[in-house]
C-alpha cells in the first residue's frame, strides 16, 4: 500500500519512506492523509492555504501539520514565512506500507492506517465527481472510472498488484520532467473482497 505524488527536490534516497508503527499511527486519520497528499501534489503551503483547499478551519489544519511534523513526514520550509505563517513541505515523495511484510505487533496500526487510506480516497473521489461535468473534453475523454468484479485468490491479487505497480512506475516522473500539457493525475488502485463475501470471523489481527 503506497501513497505518492511528484517527488520533492531531495536526493532519491530520501524520497521514499517505509512507514513504521509510529508513523502509521500518525497517518491513521483521513484528513491527515489528505493534508500530506496536498503538500506532495501542490508543494509547500501554510495552514491557512491548506484549510481553504480542504474546507477545514486553520486551527484544525495547524494541528494536523504539527502531528505530521512530529512524525517526521513533513518539514518546515526554511527562510519562508513568519511565526504566524509557517510554510511546510513533504519530507518524502512516497509513503510505503506493505501489510504482508509488517510484523505482528504492527498489525493494529497498519489496519487503522489502511482504514484511513480508504476514507481519504473516498473524500478525494467525491471532490473529483463534482468536477466531472466541468472537465475539458480531452480530460473527460481520457479519464476512466471503472469497476471490475474478478474471482481471485489473495495470491492472485498480490501478483496483479505487483504487475500494475510496474506499469505505474514507468509513467512516474517529476514535474520538471513532465511533457507540455501535463497535469497532476490521481490514480487510485484498489483491490478488495466484495463486501459481504468473506468470512470476517476468520480474519483477526
Image: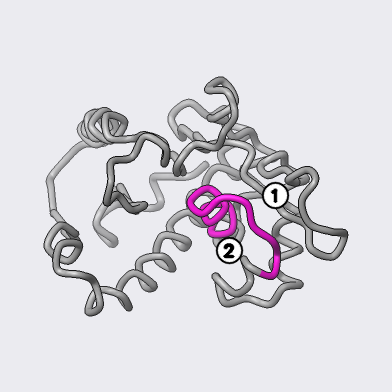
Vertical position of residue 137 compared to residue 106: above or below: below
Q: Which colour scheme is used?
A: one colour
Vertical position of residue 4 compared to residue 16: above or below: below
Disc 2: CA contacts within 10 A as few (<14), some (14-19) or many (>=20): many
Disc 1: CA contacts within 10 A as few (<14), some (14-19) or many (>=20): many
Which residue shows up at 26% across the image and 28% down it?
A: 166
Q: Magenta: predominant secondary structure element? A: helix
Q: Residue 31 carries which label?
A: 2
- Looking at the rendered image, the quarter that the N terminus falls into is top left
Q: Distance between the residues labelled 2 and 1?
A: 11 Å
Q: How many marks?
A: 2
Observer able to see residue 97:
yes
List x then y, in percent, for residue 14. 59, 26
Q: Residue 68 carries which label?
A: 1
Q: In which quarter of the image is residue 162?
A: top left
Point out the tag, 2 or 1, that comes first from the N-terminus.
2
Residue extending farthest top: 13
List x then y, in percent, for residue 64. 70, 60
Observer able to see residue 158:
no
Is there CB contact under 8 Å for labels 2 and 1?
no
List x then y, in percent, for residue 13. 56, 20
Residue extent of the magenta highlight: 34-48
Amino acid at each position: 500500500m503506497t501513497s505518492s505524488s511528484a517527488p520533492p527536490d531531495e536526493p532519491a534516497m530520501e524520497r521514499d519512506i517505509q512507514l513504521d508503527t509510529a508513523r502509521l499511527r500518525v497517518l491513521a486519520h483521513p484528513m491527515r492523509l489528505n493534508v500530506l497528499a496536498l503538500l506532495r501534489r501542490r508543494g509547500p503551503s501554510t495552514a491557512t492555504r491548506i484549510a481553504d483547499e480542504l474546507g477545514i478551519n486553520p486551527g484544525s489544519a495547524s494541528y494536523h501539520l504539527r502531528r505530521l511534523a512530529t512524525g517526521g513526514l513533513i518539514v518546515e520550509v526554511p527562510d519562508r514565512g513568519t511565526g504566524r505563517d509557517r510554510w511546510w513541505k513533504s519530507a518524502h515523495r512516497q509513503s510505503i506500507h506493505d501489510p504482508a511484510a509488517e510484523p505482528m505487533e504492527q498489525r493494529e496500526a497498519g489496519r487503522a492506517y489502511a482504514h484511513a487510506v480508504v476514507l481519504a480516497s473516498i473524500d478525494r473521489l467525491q471532490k473529483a465527481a463534482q468536477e466531472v461535468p466541468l472537465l475539458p473534453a480531452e480530460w473527460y475523454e481520457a479519464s476512466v472510472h471503472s469497476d471490475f468484479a474478478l474471482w481471485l485468490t489473495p495470491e492472485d491479487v498480490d501478483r496483479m498488484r505487483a504487475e500494475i505497480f510496474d506499469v505505474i512506475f514507468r509513467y512516474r516522473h517529476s514535474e520538471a520532467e513532465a511533457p507540455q500539457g501535463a497535469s497532476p493525475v490521481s490514480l487510485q488502485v484498489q483491490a478488495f473482497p466484495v463486501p459481504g463475501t468473506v468470512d470476517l470471523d476468520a480474519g483477526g489481527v
